[in-house]
Image (tube, helix red, strand yellow):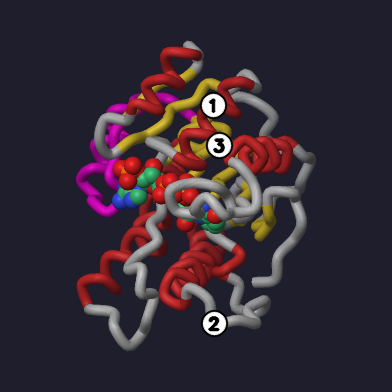
Amino acid sequence: MVNTGRAVVIGASRGLGAGLVRELAGRGWDVVGTQRAESAELAAAAAANARVSIATVDIDDPASVAALITGLGDQKFDLVFVNAGVMGPLHNSIDKVTPAELGALMLTNAVAPIRTAQALLPLVKDGGTVALMTSILGSVAGRRHGLNGLYSASKAALNSLSRGFFAADIGKRPVTVINFHPGWVKTDMGGTGADIDVATSVAGMADVLAAPRAPGQYYLDYNGDTLPW
Ligand SMILES: NC(=O)c1ccc[n+]([C@@H]2O[C@H](COP(=O)([O-])OP(=O)(O)OC[C@H]3O[C@@H](n4cnc5c(N)ncnc54)[C@H](OP(=O)(O)O)[C@@H]3O)[C@@H](O)[C@H]2O)c1
């Protein structure tokens, strides 16, 4: 359970990440939101709430992650939320995908989030939480359709790598890992026809983060319902 404290949201320039920053700061958290390039939405969040500060990182680049950590100084966090992700090639086809497209998708959605979580883990307080933004589409056990195959595979890879992260990196530390499905959300990625808006999704995830929970790894949607791996 992390009710309030200090959080860092990685990938907060727009969409769900920016929404998380606004929601957490509104609930009294001190929040560092990260951007790759200057974000008007994140700047507006910082202007509206003094609890918000801004840092810069591209999770694909280990040197950029190292610079972020240097910039965070001696701050310790109750919550590290790695939200950054991409849709990948719109054709989503295993027949059409190029090695470069596949590499970029798997790097940003699966490898880089875990590498970033590993790098930030020493900054997570005992009793804290590492949240990873995956998707219900990353569920292998729950998959009964052929939608968004490559994107889904990248989130399944994230889920798989996160299980190793929990076992090997978290180890016996009292730190919780939550793999979140945010719902199908109206963002640049989710599109205008999605089920819910950003405010609904991020309020749900903030409630889930605040709920009492033993240290462990959980795969949950924004309502707190458990998903099959
Ligand atoms: N929307 C949905 O329905 C839905 C459903 C399930 C899961 N998700 C997941 O939720 C997360 C957020 O999605 P969204 O809908 O808010 O998408 P979005 O509006 O496209 O935002 C994606 C965010 O990730 C950042 N990002 C991408 N690559 C990055 C990198 N290499 N380093 C740092 N930041 C990077 C983007 O920064 P820039 O502005 O610099 O590009 C942006 O802030 C993603 O992981 C997505 O897969 C979304």
N-terminal of the pair, mark 2 or mark 3, is: 3
N-terminal of the pair, mark 3 or mark 1, is: 1
Instruction: Reply above or below: 179 against 105.
Output: above
Label 2, ligand 1: CB separation under 8 Å? no
Residue drawn at 66 percent across, 60 percent down = 219
Instruction: Reply above or below: 55 against 58.
Output: above
Name the residue beneath numbered marker 2: 146
Front: mark 2 or 1: 2
Q: Given contact means CB atoms under 8 Å apart, are the residues at marks 2 and 3 in contact?
A: no
Using the image, tell me which numbered label, if any, was put on residue 22: 1
Q: Does residue 157 appear anywhere in the picture?
A: yes
Q: Nearer the viewer, residue 169 or 64?
A: 64
**Number of other residues with Cα within 10 Å of mark 3, as a class: few under 14, some 14 to 19, many 20 or more:** many
- Give the quarter of the image for residue 184: bottom right
Give the amino acid type for the residue marked by disc 1 in the picture: Arg
**Number of other residues with Cα within 10 Å of mark 2, as a class: few under 14, some 14 to 19, many 20 or more:** few
What distance separates the C-alpha of mark 3 from that of mark 1?
A: 15 Å
What distance separates the C-alpha of mark 2 from that of mark 1?
A: 34 Å
Residue 43 x, y percent position in the rendering: 37, 21
How many numbered discs sit on the rendered protein? 3
Using the image, tell me which numbered label, if any, was put on residue 79: 3
Give the amino acid type for the residue marked by disc 3 in the picture: Leu
